[in-house]
Amino acid sequence: MKKIFFKDLEVTLLGEQLKVGDSLNDISDLYPAGSFAGLTVEFDKEKYKILTTYPSVDTSVCDFQILELSKITSEYPEFDYIGISVDLPSALNSYKSMHPTGSIKMYSDYRNKNFAKRAGLLIDELQLFGRSIFVLDKENKVVYSEIKEQVGEQINFGKLREVLNSIK
């Protein structure tokens, strides 16, 4: 368990955090934006993947995170992009209909929070995701990881671009 901060509140990420070198071949029981039918997301072994988590699409920091990643999807179209929160699938669908999301596939982990727990990103006290971003290689191994110590801080998109440029 890891301690992080949500504003001034010290909170706990449950479990062991996903880290560089870990493998992630699929994520089960996710709900695509707009659908309450759970599915397993299996990762393509032909592409690198960018996977990001955020507490909720209706906050300004999360909104910026998604919009900035949306821009990156057009700069680096050869990657797959996955965004996960615990927002309801209907809320994600509403967000997508009103914001440019590029090629980000948005999923909800609202029901059982399986991925949030598996990746060590579930904030115990709030039942929300911590803010994070990961890059997975073609073998689905984590090659870059950023988990924010302060949930309100933004992802380092400059560093992400450096990583993507080194792969491209």
Image: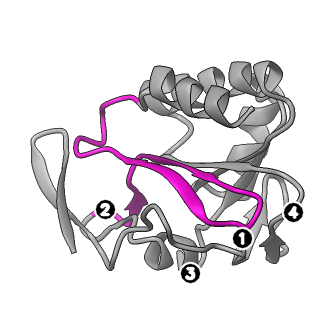
* Nearest to the observer: residue 36 or residue 118: 118
Q: Which of the two marks, 1 or 2, is nearer to us in this view? A: 1
Between the C-alphas of marks 3 and 2, the distance is 14 Å
Q: Taking 71 as reference, is 129 left or right? A: left
Is 12 within the magenta?
Answer: no
Q: Residue at coordinates 54% horizontally, 54% vertically from top-left?
A: 143
Q: Where is residue 161 in the image (x, y as percent from the top left)?
A: 58, 24
Which mark is in front, 4 or 1? Answer: 4
Sequence-first disc among 1 and 2: 1
Does the magenta-highlighted stretch encompass residue 133?
A: yes
| Left or right of residue 151, residue 110 in this image | right
* Residue 81 against residue 4 in the figure, above or below: above
**Residue 63 visible within the image:** no
Residue 112: give its label.
3
111 horizontally vs 120: left or right: right
Q: Who is closer to the viewer here, 142 or 29?
A: 142
Q: How far apart are marks 1 and 3 (CA)?
A: 9 Å
Task: State the residue position of label 1.
Answer: 30
| Tag 2 residue | 126
Mark 3: which amino acid? Asn
Earlier in the chain: of badge 4 and badge 3, it is 4
Indicate which disc, 2 or 4, sits on the residue closer to the N terminus. Answer: 4
Q: In this view, does 150 lie above or below 30?
A: above
Residue 137 picture location, percent across and down: 69, 56
Q: How far apart are marks 2 and 4 (CA)?
A: 32 Å
| CB under 8 Å between discs 3 and 2 | no
4 or 1: tag closer to the N-terminus:
1
Quadrant showing the N terminus: bottom left
Q: Is residue 16 above or below residue 164?
A: below
Discs 4/3, front = 4
